[in-house]
Image (tube, rainbow, N blue to C red):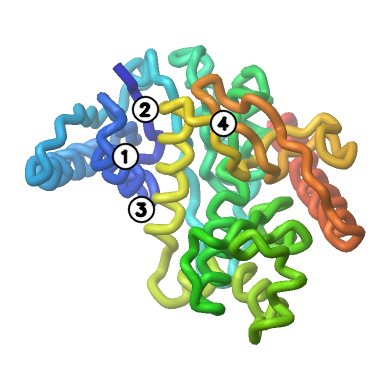
Amino acid sequence: MVKVSILGSTGVIGKNVAFTLARADTVDEIVLYARPQSVDKAKGETFDMYDALAAEDIDCDLIPTSDFNDIADSAIVLITAGIPRQEGMNRRDLAIPNAKIVMEYAKQIANHAPNSIILVATNPVDVMTTVALKYSGFDKRRVIGIGNHLDSLRLKTYMSRQININSSEVHTRVIGEHGDHMVPLLSSTTIGGIPLKYFIKEVDFDVMRLINRLKNAGNTIISKKGATEYGPSYAISNLISTIITDSHKILTVSTYLEGEIEDVSDVSLGVPVVLSKKGIAMVVPIHMNSYEKEKFYEAADIVKETTNEVLSDLNED
């Protein structure tokens, strides 16, 4: 039996992750945790999902609840709860109020699902990953932020569409902050096995325009439809499926660093890791050119500064 719990299940991301996971048919039970005042909405979501799942002959138990006891024995607990980002806000604007929510949920997970893996989706996700780590007391390999996985998928898609080539031929990655200080690893990007620096000589390829579009992707979607929905939900479901199937894929998530990448320590950032059913099996070494290193260090400094401010505020409370 594979059980996954979602804290913040009535939000846009939480309910979409639940449905995407159920449709994937790799999870036996999904707990949709909501605050007591929202549990009826969670029940309504499950009724609606059951109707859809019946059309595909999928049997997955959906448990709406406001009782933390129901998350016991979860393989993964996803934290999506928090104040959503509005148009014009950056992810750091959400840091203090969301940190208080993540802190409380991390403590509850430690009490009720001590053997689980915590997956953090609440923004700013790199900061929240450290908050969840500190207040759960878990080994850092079992506290994972969604990091730059979605950013990496977006970059892959943008590149494939710009040069009109199948996305499976694009191998690229984004690291650093899931935010304004993300770092696309263009120096190690390949198109059909050909290094990008050679490929762009043969095609009309506006790299800077692509990077700017990537950094503004979230705000662009929010300005047009009010929230990001399908992209984040699929990316999170993809991470969960990778973990529970013990796939050992290399994906870019946020993890607390202790010198594994360019000696950066005491901060959670997006880096490539091998994911397994135990969490992070290893942090993957990467090569960066001098510009990418500079931007990675910059991301580390900014995220660390925000994290320290948030932790100081939580300690005062």
CA gap between label 4 and label 2 equals 16 Å
Q: CA distance from mark 2 to mark 1?
A: 9 Å
Q: To which residue does mark 4 refer?
A: 275
Contact (Cβ within 8 Å) of mark 4 with mark 1 = no
Compare marks 3 and 4 and give the one earlier in the sequence: 3
Camera-nearest residue between 30 and 130 = 30
Name the kind of residue labelled 3 in the image.
Answer: Val
Q: Quadrant of residue 32?
A: top left
CB-based contact (under 8 Å), mark 2 and mark 1: yes
Nearer mark to the viewer, of 4 and 2 = 4
Which dot marks residue 196? Answer: none
- Quadrant location, the N terminus: top left
> Quick one: label 3 or label 1, which is nearer the N terminus?
3
Q: Nearer the viewer, mark 3 or mark 4?
A: 4
* Residue 4, numbered circle: 2
Residue 44 locus on image (x, y percent):
16, 43
- The mark nearer the N terminus, 2 or 1, is 2
